Image (tube, rainbow, N blue to C red):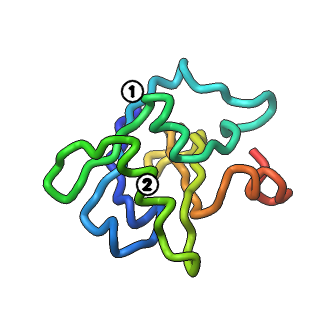
Amino acid sequence: MLYVNASLTDMIPSDQFKGWSYRTQRHPRDLALQRNMLSTAWMDMPASLLFNDASIHDENGNVVANDTFMALLENLPESGPDTAAIRYCVVIGADRRPALQLQCLPASAVVLSGKAAFKG
């Protein structure tokens, strides 16, 4: 099982989310790794919340309601990213064994899927 407790500001760089976290857990058998690839397709991080695959927690560890978080995203300044995309990837760890990793970039899945270097 992969347990993730990531800093939200590492995913969407905004001071508004300082101390907030993105939490999820996934079993490798539930991931749709693409044929001849070591990663899943990019997915918009907010979609993972709507699918109840993850949750956002504030600086006190309290769960933030999805509709509240979505409203905050809509009101972010246009000067920075207002979303993030995630994917799961098989990597080789320091111990030279395969491991599962959650990867994230501050862009939409549509944008990343259209760039050859980021296709997964």
**Residue 82: x %, y % from top left:** 54, 64
**Residue 47: x %, y % from top left:** 55, 39
How many labels, in total?
A: 2
**Vertical position of residue 42 compared to residue 36: above or below:** below
Quarter of the picture containing the N terminus is top left
Secondary structure state at the residue bearing disc 1: loop
Secondary structure state at the residue bearing disc 2: helix
Quarter assignment of residue 17: bottom left
Q: Nearer the viewer, mark 2 or mark 1?
A: 2
**Vertical position of residue 74 compared to residue 93: above or below:** below
- Is residue 89 or residue 69 the one in the foreground? 69
Quarter of the picture containing the C terminus is top right
Residue at the spot x=80%, y=60% of the render? 117
Q: Which residue is mark 1?
A: 1
- Is residue 85 or residue 30 the one in the foreground? 85
Mark 2 and mark 1 lie on one chain; the one further toward the N terminus is: 1
Residue at the spot x=75%, y=30% of the render? 34
- The residue at the far left in this view is 60
Q: Which mark is residue 80?
A: none
**Residue 85: x %, y % from top left:** 60, 52
- Is residue 64 or residue 100 the one in the foreground? 64
- The residue at the far bottom in this view is 79
Task: Give how far apart the Cα atoms at labels 2 and 1 are.
Answer: 31 Å
Amino acid type shown at disc 1: Met
- The residue at the far top in this view is 29
Amino acid type shown at disc 2: Ala
Residue at the spot x=67%, y=44% of the render? 42
Q: Residues within 10 Å of mark 1 (few under 14, many from 20)?
A: few
Q: Which mark is residue 71?
A: 2
